[in-house]
Amino acid sequence: MFINCKVNIDEDSLKDYLGKTAGKKISLTITDNSTSLLSVKTKGNVVYVRLQRIFLEGGIEIWNEIANFVKHKKGSMPLFRKFAKHNQKSLKKDFKGRVTIITQGRYYDLRNIYESVNNQYFNGEISSPITWGMQRPRRYTRKRTLGSYSRHTDIIRISPLLDKKTVPKHFITFIVYHEMLHADMGVQEVNGRRSYHTKEFRKREKLFEDYDKAIAWEKRYI
């Protein structure tokens, strides 16, 4: 029998706990992704952990399993699996009730672009859903938010303003790549403060094959 003894903890406290228990420098991103409950990647001396929000209520024994997995990159994690199974129905219901995924636009299919970028730059490891954002009234278009990534919902949204014949494919592909970088790298700490566009982020951003062309087009037309 699975005993559901939930203990709440906030994101920062769990990050500190996992770091101390695993003996690693942790970057923790809490998501609402119901298909990818846990992912662990090591880059340099930092371990990037993406964990479904429900595990903030998992309890010490489950957090210890997660910390052990972070430390050794292996482990059966029976309590983790039982907890996930116990909450499976509520996870699927909650995720489905909040999100409508639309990838097919009038001119561009985000799914095709996403899969191409994922394979070329991320070894197919990004699992964050992508969708067109909401069409905003004209009075809001000057804000020019071309894309976004929410670490809470683990969803990438691309502005429908880019779904136009006049927008070159290399530019919208760059925006998708930029947001996928956020999904891959999470939030990093610089001098004790959270930072989204770190030096490492900007360095990886320039690895995009049409970076210069995309930036030049943005400066001219956006």
Image (cartoon, helix red, strand yellow):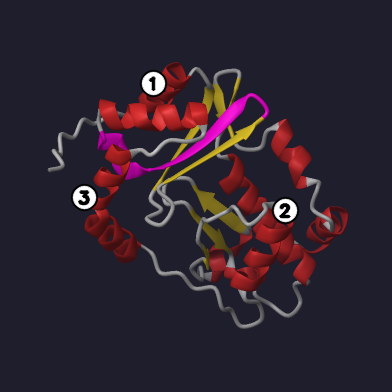
| Distance between the alpha carbons at the discs numbered 2 and 1 | 32 Å
Asked if residue 159 can be seen in this view, the reply is yes
Query: Foreground: 174 or 28?
Result: 28
Tag 3 residue:
86
Amino acid type at mark 1? Tyr
Q: Earlier in the sequence, mark 3 or mark 2?
A: 3
Residue occupying the far bottom of the picture: 106
Asked if residue 111 lies left or right of residue 53, the reply is right
Sequence-first disc among 2 and 1:
1
Which of the 4 image quadrants contains residue 175? bottom right
- The residue lying at 71 percent from left, 65 percent from top is 172
Q: Which residue is mark 2?
A: 121
Depth check, front residue: 137 or 174:
174
Give the label, 3 or 1, closer to the camera.
3
Seen in the image, is 27 located left or right of residue 153? Answer: right
Judge whether 54 appears above or below 194 on screen.
Answer: below
Q: Residues within 10 Å of mark 1 (few under 14, many from 20)?
A: some
Amino acid type assigned to the residue bearing label 2 in the image: Tyr
Q: How packed is label 2: few (under 14 Cα within 10 Å), some, or many (20 or more)?
A: some
Point out residue 211 in the picture as x, y percentages from the top left corner.
82, 54
Q: Position of residue 191 (x, y in %)?
A: 60, 18
Q: CA distance from mark 3 to mark 2?
A: 35 Å
